[in-house]
Image (cartoon, grey):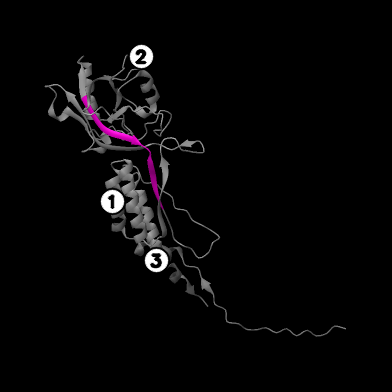
């Protein structure tokens, strides 16, 4: 015998929450972001990283720690990886720390026009000097400038290179050159621009403990054309080079911080790099990261959810 079954329905209030639209989210972000603050981040990072020395990288990191704290990030830490030229992480060998105080390359000769006499001056244009350039003896050194040719005797000379000298450094070391003067550029139409040489290891990018401390300068296309004109005329071109630089065991600094989420199931990692000389690469990247995180803290995304019941 089938017994009747009583079904009791309890009417409970139901609250439906509508997801915010993409347009609403974008409007809130546009309102919350501060472009001038982002520009200030960029300028501050560039002001120290443009010198591309490890003491300046440390100054950048200290500024970023404060900026990230002021932006509302939590658990902000300034940490560091060894920069000693020997520590290995997997197959990667950490580079040596490097510092430079001054560097200058000056042509010798009474008939050298004033505009071409000083080919490189680190204190005026930091990219005149290659990163990890070796030092000269105190007071500098005088040497002949010649065109790089691996079939010629270039021992003890400064060689003009048409390609990035970092790509052929192993061969420069093998031939016994004193140093390289880079004339390669990615933008040859910029006649007074300089290509930054930011790799100087014997076996790849990083200058490690066993790398050769060759001198490395970088000159402009206009300067390169003038020097090559002198060489084409059969003249002996000599220059005085001074580099006050040093290698040492130091630290590669980096800064971390956290914006706590609502749960522990997922994490979003924002990763970028400082420690390069350009505003484009990569002070703007650092600035956009910090300002985007600051905006996340400023915007009330929970206020975008509406009661649709």
Q: Which residues are magenta?
A: 240-255
Q: In the rendered structure, find residue 151 and report the number of the disc placed on it.
A: 2
In the picture of the structure, the residue carrying the numbered disc 1 is: 44
Tags 2 and 1 touching, CB below 8 Å:
no
Residue 54 sits in quarter: top left
In the picture of the structure, the residue carrying the numbered disc 3 is: 299
Look at the image and say whether residue 148 sits in the magenta stretch: no
Q: Secondary structure at mark 1?
A: helix
Q: CA distance from mark 3 to mark 2?
A: 64 Å
Look at the image and say whether residue 253 sits in the magenta stretch: yes
Q: CA distance from mark 2 to mark 1?
A: 47 Å
| Residue at screen point 51% across, 75% down | 308
Give the quarter of the figure containing the N terminus: bottom right
Horizontal and vertical percent position of residue 299: 39, 66
Mark found first going from the N terminus, 3 or 2: 2
Say few, some or many: other residues with alpha carbon within 10 Å of mark 2 (under 14 / 14 to 19 / 20 or more).
Answer: few
User: Which numbered mark, 1 or 3, is in the foreground of this view?
Assistant: 1
Q: CA distance from mark 1 to mark 3?
A: 25 Å
Q: Is residue 98 left or right of residue 219?
A: right
| Residue at screen point 42% across, 31% down | 204
| Residue at screen point 33% across, 57% down | 67
Mark found first going from the N terminus, 2 or 1: 1
């Amino acid at each position: 015998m089938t017994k009747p079954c009583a079904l009791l329905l309890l009417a409970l209030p139901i609250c439906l929450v509508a997801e915010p639209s993409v347009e609403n989210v974008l409007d809130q972000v546009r309102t919350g972001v501060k472009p001038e603050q982002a520009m200030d981040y960029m300028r501050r990072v560039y002001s120290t990283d443009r010198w591309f020395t490890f003491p300046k990288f440390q100054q950048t990191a200290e500024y970023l720690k404060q900026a990230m704290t002021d932006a509302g990030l939590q658990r902000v830490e300034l940490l560091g990886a060894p920069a000693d030229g020997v520590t290995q992480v997997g197959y990667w060998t950490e580079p040596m720390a490097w510092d430079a105080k001054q560097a200058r390359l000056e042509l010798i000769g009474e008939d050298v026009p004033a505009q071409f006499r000083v080919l490189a001056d680190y204190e005026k244009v930091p990219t005149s000097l290659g990163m990890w350039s070796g030092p000269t003896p105190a007071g500098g050194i005088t040497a002949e400038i010649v065109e790089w040719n691996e079939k010629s005797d270039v021992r003890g000379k400064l060689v003009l290179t048409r390609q990035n000298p970092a790509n052929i450094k192993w061969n420069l070391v093998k031939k016994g050159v004193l140093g390289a003067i880079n004339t390669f550029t990615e933008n040859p139409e910029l006649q007074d621009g300089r290509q930054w040489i930011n790799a100087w290891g014997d076996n790849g990018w990083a200058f490690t403990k066993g790398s050769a401390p060759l001198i490395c300068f970088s000159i402009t296309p206009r300067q390169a054309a003038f020097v090559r004109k002198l060489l084409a005329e059969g003249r002996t071109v000599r220059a005085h080079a001074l580099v006050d630089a040093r290698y040492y065991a130091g630290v590669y600094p980096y800064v971390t911080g956290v914006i706590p989420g609502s749960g522990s199931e997922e994490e979003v990692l924002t990763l970028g790099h400082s420690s390069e000389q350009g505003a484009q690469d990569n002070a703007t990247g650092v600035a956009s990261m910090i300002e985007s995180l600051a905006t996340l803290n400023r915007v009330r995304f929970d206020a975008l959810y509406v009661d649709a019941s």
